[in-house]
Image (cartoon, rainbow, N blue to C red):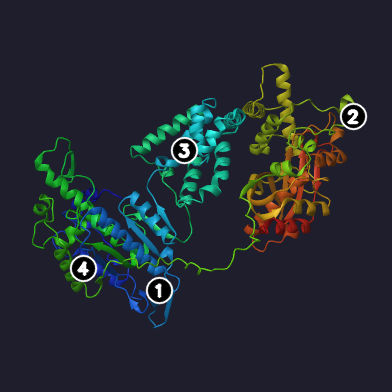
Amino acid sequence: GGDVFAYLQAARHRAGARYGLDRNFRSTPALIRAVETLFRAPESQAFLVEGIEYQTVQAGKPAGRTLHIGQQALAPITCWPLPTDCSKKPEAEAACQAGCVEQIRRMLQPDEPARIRRVDADGTAEERPVRPRDIAVLVNKNDQAAEVQRALSRVGIPAVCVHQQSVLTTDEAEELRRILRAMHAATDEALIRGALLTQLMGVTLDSLTSADQDENVWQARIDTFQRAQQTWRERGVLAVVQPLVQDAAPRLLGFEDGERRLSNYLQLAELLASGEAESFGTGGLLTWLQNGMQRAADGETADAEQLRLESDEALVRIVTVHKSKGLEYPIVFMPFAPWLGTFGHPDKPPFRFHDEAGESVFDPLGDDANAAASVREARAEGIRLLYVAMTRAELAVFFPWGACNGVANSALASLLHRADDVDPTGWWASNSAGPLDHAATNARLDALSAESGGCIEVAALPVTQGNTGRAPAPPATTAGARTDLPGPYHPWSMFSFTGLLRTAAPAPALAGAADELPAAGDAPDNPVRSSDRLPDLPGGTGFGSAIHAVLETARPTDWPADGAVTDFEYAQTAECLRQYGLVLPDDAHTRRMIEHCVQLVRRTLHSPIPTLGPLAAIPPERQRVEMEFMFRLGGSDLKALLSLLRAHGYGPEHPQGSATLRGLMHGFIDLVVQQNECFHVIDYKTNRIGPGANDYAAANLQQAMRSHHYDLQYLIYQLALHRHLRQRLPAYDPTRQLGDVFYLFLRGMSEDQPGHGIFHDKPPLELIEQMDQLLDARETP
């Protein structure tokens, strides 16, 4: 918030130009009166600072909304006296939290929930049940938020924490640091063991001990970290962190705070990706992460590092009072209100306060003359926070109060137990509200209720009666056990085209399944005329990934159809080739090779594609590059999917293997383009089918597509696009809007030979819809 003392200084200098807000458009008139009763009680300086007085406000909207349980209308403010056996702070805090949770449970119980009733000016009445999102629990500290969330979860009430804590201070940040250290030093067995034992990697101590006794198993784990190190260097940190999080998600969500953990990992992955732009190499990113964690531990939190909501569902909100400024909620609970304003030791040096002129004073030595000012200012801040909390509600506020250790110097003690005729400066100089006992606190609450005219109610702290609101257990039975118990469900898994192919296709075919490797029999044996021979470009996955990277960012204006190779084209291509591991010595052969790569990219952009025209002519806003997808797999059998494909002439001719497809299908479509209303799938392939241009004619492409089983790949892509469009487009019509598939074999594309190097198919819509239905079907145990 703003500096209140800067405002007071400005107000003194411009006394005639002060403006205020005299209407409250948030709270009901009854709640406004209840809050006024609290804050006008000590009429002399309720806020303890000269220049800040309680201003009476009017309701900005007429009375009309009330909160009911059964037939009883609840008061705008309900205060719960603390039980007489709760004199110690831990006991009192536990009782306050339990009472708050029990009251929320009662309000949300499905058979008789609390209701919000609205009566319009014409007498028309409407009411609805209280929903979790109507409720906010305001706490003093972040650790209290976590405790309340766990307590609500135990009685079946979903809640979400709104934090100011940095994600870099969480256990998940430390786990990722350990894992990345092990990947960075992939031969350090001690670091690898520490990484494996994290919750994210999920290896148990027993499993780790067994691996130590089997050299082959342990070596395989070391190899995994070494491959991860290489992937990190080549493709960035997200390429190693995202698969870890995706694989661990089902296990993490089994924890009570699973959504919180998963949200933290995803946020940390984004931060690490942004950190790569500020650091050099894997070691530099680790240093960046360590420095950020240290800053966060010291209390410095950037906006991007603040913990995000783990869920955006309609849940109970738990938020610190400080974070709640400017927000509003229909119903507010303040379980820890008795201790609001008691943080720190303002009576001990160093003292911080403002002098009479409003100037900030810092006294590190602790002059006794400054102690009272330091205490008064700290307590005044507590009272302002209490006012913030009380005024967040639209309908109702619930809080406890009573005699207990640690409450005598709180904000509530100032409001409720300082006599009106006591000078606040002298009163706060004693740093105490005086002795408080249950008789005094209960008497003050009763008097306050009477003063409010029924707007403040004093009620017993709710106590759990044994029924938590969960569904009752089924009655016991003496019947014998069934002998035909259903089998277990298969675990949730992450699938991809490559993973399916590994199971479905015979081993020889799999050897050529990678996008950029030639399959056996791809290259024809026909002799090639020298005029027909294509440039001899590199092969392998690194080259394919490099060309993909160039195409992802290539703009047609920077890549003309003809003319000499520009410096920009040359540098961009060379950089991508180096990034993916190609060694580029500075010689004439390398320069020619890079220029040939530039020409390959140009041909890809400017060669006409049947029914589409050249990619360069399609506006960028109608292109979606590297479209990532994930879609649900309900639990069908792989054999059923392959049988369906064979019935339509697709898929492996001799499928083998079996798998239950339960979880998520994940992948990336190189390019999706929109032409008129229709959306088309485009995939780039750098496979070397043959040495000559004629080797990329339609018949040879058909053979390459079948040998690599790319038909299975593009059917998955079509289904992903179909589901995406169905969700995003109103009145989606797949007969008009689900388009064709184009596989561009880049080495063979040519502006002079339209269609060369281009495989084109239009899978039948009937097949896509049958695949959709089959893959969405639930597993039968």
| Badge 2 amino acid | Asp
Quadrant of the rendered structure where residue 124 is?
Answer: bottom left
Question: Callout 4 environment at 10 Å: few (<14), some (14 to 19), or many (20+)?
Answer: some
* Quarter of the image that includes the C terminus: bottom right
Tell me whether circle 2 and circle 1 mark residues in contact (CB < 8 Å). no
Residue matched to label 3: 175
Question: In percent of the image, x 33 and y 64: which residue is there?
Answer: 393
Estimate the x, y position of residue 684 in percent, counting from the top left.
73, 39
- Eye-nearest disc, 4 or 1: 1
Whether residue 430 appears in this view of the structure is yes
- Label 4 with label 1: CB-CB less than 8 Å: no
User: What amino acid type should be assigned to the residue bearing mark 4?
Assistant: Thr
Give the Cα separation between the discs numbered 3 and 2. 55 Å
Query: Which callout, 3 or 2, points at the residue further toward the start of the chain?
Result: 3
Please indicate whether residue 612 sits to the left or right of residue 779 in the image. right
User: Which tag, 3 or 4, sits closer to the chain's start?
Assistant: 4
Q: Position of residue 72 (x, y in %)?
A: 33, 78
Residue picked out by circle 4: 37
Nearest to N terminus: mark 3 or mark 1: 1
Residue 529, horizontal then vertical, whole percent: 90, 26
- Answer with left or right where residue 592 lies relative to residue 325: right
